Amino acid sequence: MKTTIRKFEQKRYLANKYCPCGKSNRDGKFATEKGFKNKFIGHCHSCLKDFWPDLGTLVPLERHAPVEKVNYCNPKTSHIEETFDYNLTSGFAKFLVEVFGFDKAREAVEKYYLGVWEENKTVFWQIDQTGDPRGAKIISYKKDGHRKGYPNWHHKIVMKMECKLNQTFFGAHLIPNYDLPIAVAEGAKAAVIMSLIRPKYIWISAESKGGLNRNKCESICQYDVTLFPDAGCYELWKNTGGPYGFNTTYEVELLMQKGYIKEKHDITDYYLNCPKLRVSLKPKELKKTDLEWNDFVDQNPDLNLEKSR
């Protein structure tokens, strides 16, 4: 049997932008054999397949240089305690107090371990299902509950660390503690607010429009999951969550079509901002009056929408 020592092109992405298996080679997983640039000859570390022209070659005889170990962010549980918003002083906590009252706001802050950083910035911790923190997004909020500026990360502006995030769902730590179906929103703010409005779900957040990656989806695929994409993102999330058996509600899309919310708005915009809806969230109970919405719900029984009381 032939025992040629293999050598590989150093700049993997430039040598081949795709793997023969069809995956992008932007991360350099496909190693092209030296001298065969732009040809599908080499080894893929993504699909773990060899692509040699001589099938009699003994492989692997030599691989390219070992992949450098990734330095993942590793925040400590003590960091959660250090930032915890005991006095509800962050911008988002103050908004929750204004809308839901102090007791409900305190409930949400404690449930999601919401923190506070300088200038009343809100800290949204990502804690996995085993209780280990993965990272935290830090966001400033105005009095009206809208975001101010751009988000940052705890490991960058607090710990001053250079590391790679290994993200999980925001709110994932709640899953083992509640025997409830899971609802996935796009943003952490929406998950927190909806946990107070619709407590029949465990509300978690994918943290972005494209946040439903494989690792996150696989971590909850054994549960009863309903996705609540922002308006205009129904098809994207349906196609992403479908293979994992997730339901994707059309509710937010219908709210947009009916004119209750605008494109890119989320489910909370209906409850908090729609002028046709009169909402009183304090002190304890959601009270709303919207006869037109009740008629709409009656005409769409398959959507499982909440009817106004």
Image (cartoon, grey):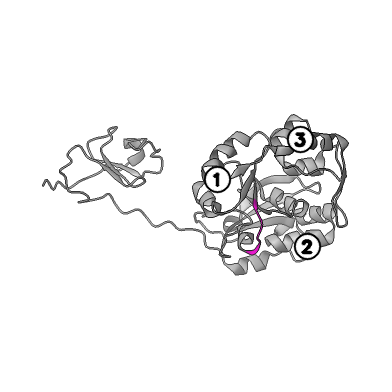
Residue 261 % position (x, y): 76, 35
Q: Earlier in the sequence, mark 3 or mark 1?
A: 1
Depth order, front residue of 218/143: 218
Q: Are marks 2 and 1 in contact (CB under 8 Å)?
A: no
Question: Which secondary structure is most common in the magenta stretch?
Answer: loop
From the viewer's perspective, tell me whether residue 133 is left or right of residue 272: left
Q: Position of residue 222 (x, y in %)?
A: 54, 54
Q: Is residue 197 above or below residue 178?
A: above
Q: Is residue 298 visible?
A: yes
Taking the magenta stretch, the answer to whether it contains residue 296 is no
Q: Which residue is mark 1?
A: 245
Q: Residue at x 66, y 61 (%)?
A: 178
Q: Residues within 10 Å of mark 1 (few under 14, many from 20)?
A: some
The label number, if any, that marks residue 261 in the structure image:
3
**Which amino acid type corresponds to the residue marked 3 in the rendered image?**
Ile
For disc 2, the marked residue is: 106
Segment colored magenta: 177-182
Determine which of the numbered discs, if any, sits on residue 228 in the image.
Answer: none
Say if 286 sits above or below 235 in the image: below
The first of marks 2 and 3 along the sequence is: 2
Q: For residue 249, what is the image quadrant?
A: top right
Kindly give the residue lying farthest to the left in the view shown.
Answer: 1
Label 1 amino acid? Gly
* Residue nearest the viewer, comparing 66 with 105: 105
Mark 2 vs mark 1, CA separation in Å:
34 Å
Front: mark 2 or 1: 1
Mark 3–mark 1 Cα distance, whole angstroms, equals: 28 Å
Question: Residue sitting at 63 percent across and 36 percent down?
Answer: 234
Q: Nearer the viewer, mark 3 or mark 1?
A: 1
In whole angstroms, how far apart are the C-alphas of marks 2 and 3? 28 Å
User: Type of residue at label 2?
Assistant: Arg
For label 3, count other residues whose C-alpha is less than 10 Å away and answer few (under 14), some (14-19) or many (20+). many
